[in-house]
Amino acid sequence: MKPTPWQDIEFRHLDYAIAVKRHQGFMQAAIALGIDQGFLSKQIQRLEARLGFSLFDRTHRPLGMTEAGKSFLMKAEQIIEQTENAVERAQDIQAGKQGRLEVGINTSIANSKLPDIIQAFHQQFPHVNLVLHELASYHQIEHLRNRQLDVGFFHKHTLHNLTAEERSMFSTIPILHEPLIVVLPQHHRLAKQSKISLAQLNGDRFVLPPHTRMYGLRDQIDQLCLRANCKPKVVQEAAWITTVLSLVAGGIGVSLLPANVNYLQRAGVVYRDIQETSPLLEIVAVRHVNHHSVILENFLTTLTDS
């Protein structure tokens, strides 16, 4: 099928015509475009021949436009603007400057570095939407495995629950290290001390994270207590920090939690440092090794640069 003449029109032809319209003359338009006036005039004549109608009324000074020319160039300007916008948007998407990132978070990262991370990323990529999902660590791992999350934040010890083969599916970036601290009911006998030896809590009732699903954290707590000659009497297990704090505030027992709880103001509880050397819990950013996107790479770069 033979193409119609207008199908040979290029964007530069439209640019030439729009320049003539805006400058109301060939001389001024040629100067603005940086081309020869005679060349510009011939290009407009060829464009008009392909269109089958005149764009400009050359009998008027300054140069006038035909009614057909007015209608055509109004739409042509819109087409060029829309094309420029489409190209710019596609380039931004290619560069990871537009789009969305699915991010898993838990209480620990939300209480610590998350505000700084969000601010640093949005300063560089203001048009990327960070979609935050509040999920327990074991749920984040499942979502990362299924590509429902691009990146997750949680304590590295959670990965110890996985087999070596499963752990090889993920890569991590360290975010921060934090110790454990003691959480006491407000009126506990040791509440007025600034530091507490765990030996002083020997025999106390404890509210601790469960062995199941949080084995890494619970194992570190158990080992710390064992070294400090403290034998906790575990009366309740709870996985969520807010639940633990509520139980401690209610006098059910004491607890050991990551230091980020210092940022949570909870009536009825006090936080105290541990006198013994506490293990450092590492919060990491986790991604699936086979999941790649420009936005994700930009986000991870922001983490390592901050």
Image: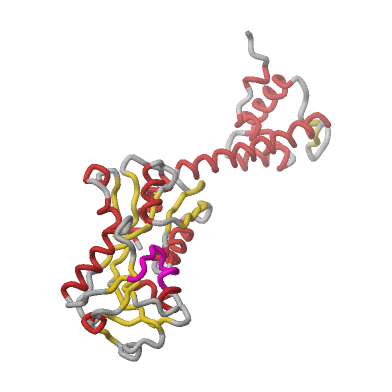
Q: Is residue 16 left or right of residue 137?
A: right
Indicate yes or no whether the magenta region holds residue 241.
yes
Q: For the C terminus, give its image quadrant.
A: bottom left
Counting from the top left corner in percent of width and height, residue 35 is at: 58, 35
Counting from the top left corner in percent of width and height, residue 281 is at: 27, 66
Q: Name the residue rendered at 46%, 49% in the picture.
A: 102
Q: Is residue 43 above or below residue 254?
A: above
Determine the image quadrant of residue 111. bottom left
Segment colored magenta = 235-245
Q: Is residue 26 left or right of residue 185?
A: right
Q: Is residue 115 above or below residue 73?
A: below
Counting from the top left corner in percent of width and height, residue 126 is at: 51, 56
Indicate yes or no whether the magenta region holds residue 52.
no
Determine the image quadrant of residue 244. bottom left
Query: Which one is nearer the viewer's eye here, 152 or 294?
Result: 152
The number of callouts visible is 0
Q: Is residue 171 left or right of residue 244?
A: left
Q: Name the residue rendered at 29%, 70% in the picture.
A: 178
Q: For the N terminus, give its image quadrant.
A: top right
